[in-house]
Image (cartoon, rainbow, N blue to C red):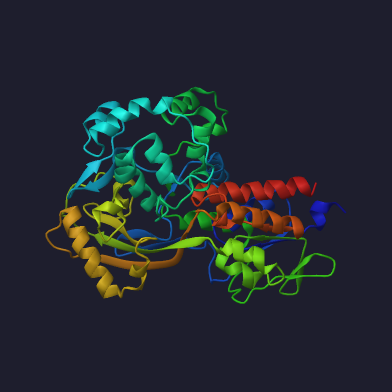
């Protein structure tokens, strides 16, 4: 009997990481079972249809930053259709001095925009000639100040990090939080020069699939989950596993709910690991647990008749120095199809993050009062009368890849080496985006397929 046919893999967590892993294990012909604590697969991905609106509780979109994400949609093409954001709504806004400003995409816009000081615009000319950094623990804020200047940090990078991580660039370490940016400087010595050189390097057909376009699935991201489940098989997914605990047996295999497994892949959050794996050394688990999570609240607003400013844009972000009560607003109906009635609008407003974690505890009434004030001013509404209001709170929304990251990754590696067959995955490592989760899941499945040949 081959190793592959005798293997039995447990996957803890039926979010995107777990489902992608299961999908590719299935393609490799490897036996597996997925365990999920909630009553549904998909993790935080859930699509809702109500009152003429289609909206998400969980991630709203992804970025096609990994070719593996494109190939997953190709593999699922008969059951799920990829939707790329409307090119006509690609503008990104930044709120500064009581109005929205479009982030420039070209040289002329970069010269004329008020987002950057004259000094920093001029200073940018010298960016390709500055020495590359030598500190692997350098924060995003320090890196941007060193290479581009304070106004680039304040008015673009700071709100960008608020939008992606709900975090603080002063605390996120570039090598772990934005590894591609870190590697660009290390490999080429420059962002501008490196970006130009990299764009001219030949790419394989596989690499070309990483278009960086914003994506969803037609009809909502839940259709991606449904397609994955169809191929995985509902019979291979156990739901409502609320008291799950993994045991290690005398023969070094793993036991879950009286079933034996040769490998266990965890996609659970750092805060769950000690309970899930009581046999793991507490000092290493505590190192992983030092990773902080941003607390985020999403307020989804639907308007059947939009009476605010024109919103042909992806959305807007707010620099922390503006001292506003929201992180940003995503204008979903502007770039995704059939998300709101024809003359209406669907918005997602984000509140909290690492700078204002206490806002997650606001009552619905107090939170809506805060959001109403901000949205009316920023979006040009005379009245705030949405036809749809949904509030979603995420106490463990986004992991922060900060100064503990090096020790965290070392602890993960040490545990995987000590306990053969254990794999600690999910968003505790390898990135936080949907494409990162897909790549990780596929890589794990391919790695196991090679190991079990």
Lateral position of residue 173 relative to residue 3, left or right: left
Lateral position of residue 268 relative to residue 446, left or right: left
Q: Residue at x 39, y 49 (%)?
A: 161
- Would residue 236 be seen by someone viewing this image from the given angle? no
Instruction: From the top left corner, tell me how far across and down residue 223 is, in percent.
Output: 48, 55
Identify whether 370 is placed above or below 416. Answer: below
Identify whether 267 is placed above or below 142. Answer: below
Q: Residue furthest left?
A: 382
Q: Could you say which is closer to the camera, residue 127 or residue 96? A: 127
Q: Residue at x 52, y 31 (%)?
A: 208
Q: Quadrant of the N terminus?
A: bottom right
Q: Residue at x 85, y 51 (%)?
A: 2
Q: Residue at x 70, y 70 (%)?
A: 246
Q: How many marks?
A: 0
Q: Could you say which is closer to the camera, residue 403 or residue 202? A: 403
Q: Quadrant of residue 52?
A: bottom left
Instruction: From the top left corner, tell me how far across and down residue 250 is, in percent.
Output: 84, 70
Instruction: From the top left corner, tell me how far across and down residue 80 is, in percent.
Output: 50, 50
Q: Could you say which is closer to the camera, residue 232 or residue 352? A: 352
Identify whether 274 is placed above or below 317. Answer: below
Instruction: From the top left corner, tell me how far across and down residue 324 is, in percent.
Output: 25, 58
């Amino acid at each position: 009997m081959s190793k592959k046919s005798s293997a039995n893999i447990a996957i803890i967590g039926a979010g995107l990481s777990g489902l992608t892993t299961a999908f590719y294990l299935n393609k490799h012909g490897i036996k597996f079972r997925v365990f999920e604590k909630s009553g549904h697969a998909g993790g935080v991905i859930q699509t809702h249809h109500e009152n003429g609106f289609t909206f998400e509780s969980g991630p709203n979109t992804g970025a096609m930053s990994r070719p593996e994400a494109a190939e997953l949609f190709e593999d699922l093409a008969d059951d799920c259709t990829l939707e790329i954001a409307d090119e006509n709504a690609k503008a990104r806004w930044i709120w500064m001095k009581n109005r929205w400003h479009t982030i420039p995409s070209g040289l002329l816009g970069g010269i004329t925009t008020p987002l950057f000081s004259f000094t920093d615009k001029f200073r940018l000319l010298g960016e390709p000639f500055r020495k590359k950094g030598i500190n692997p623990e350098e924060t995003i804020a320090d890196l941007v100040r060193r290479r581009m200047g304070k106004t680039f940090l304040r008015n673009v990078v700071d709100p960008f990090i608020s939008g992606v991580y709900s975090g603080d660039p002063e605390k996120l370490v570039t090598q772990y939080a934005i590894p591609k940016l870190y590697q660009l400087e290390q490999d080429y010595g420059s962002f501008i020069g490196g970006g130009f050189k990299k764009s001219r390097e030949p790419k394989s057909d596989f690499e070309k699939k990483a278009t960086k376009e914003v994506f969803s699935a037609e009809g909502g991201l839940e259709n991606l989950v449904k397609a994955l489940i169809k191929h995985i098989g509902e019979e291979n997914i156990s739901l409502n596993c609320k008291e799950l605990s993994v045991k290690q047996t005398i023969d070094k295999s793993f036991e879950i709910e009286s079933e034996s497994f040769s490998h266990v892949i965890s996609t659970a959050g750092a805060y769950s690991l000690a309970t899930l794996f009581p046999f793991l050394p507490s000092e290493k688990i505590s190192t992983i647990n030092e990773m902080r999570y941003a607390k985020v609240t999403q307020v989804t607003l639907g308007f059947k008749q939009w009476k605010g400013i024109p919103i042909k844009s992806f959305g807007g972000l707010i620099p922390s120095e503006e001292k506003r009560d929201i992180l940003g607003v995503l204008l979903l109906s502007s770039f995704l199809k059939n998300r709101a009635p024809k003359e209406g609008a669907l918005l997602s407003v984000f509140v909290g993050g690492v700078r204002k974690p206490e806002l997650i505890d606001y009552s619905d009434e107090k939170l809506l009062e805060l959001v109403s004030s901000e949205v009316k001013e920023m979006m040009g509404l005379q009245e705030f009368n949405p036809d749809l209001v949904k509030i979603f709170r995420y106490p463990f929304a986004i992991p922060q890849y900060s100064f503990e990251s090096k020790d965290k990754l070392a602890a993960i590696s040490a545990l995987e080496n000590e306990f053969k067959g254990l794999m600690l995955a999910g968003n505790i490592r390898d990135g936080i985006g949907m494409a990162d989760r897909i790549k990780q899941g596929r890589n794990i499945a391919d790695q196991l397929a090679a190991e079990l040949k």
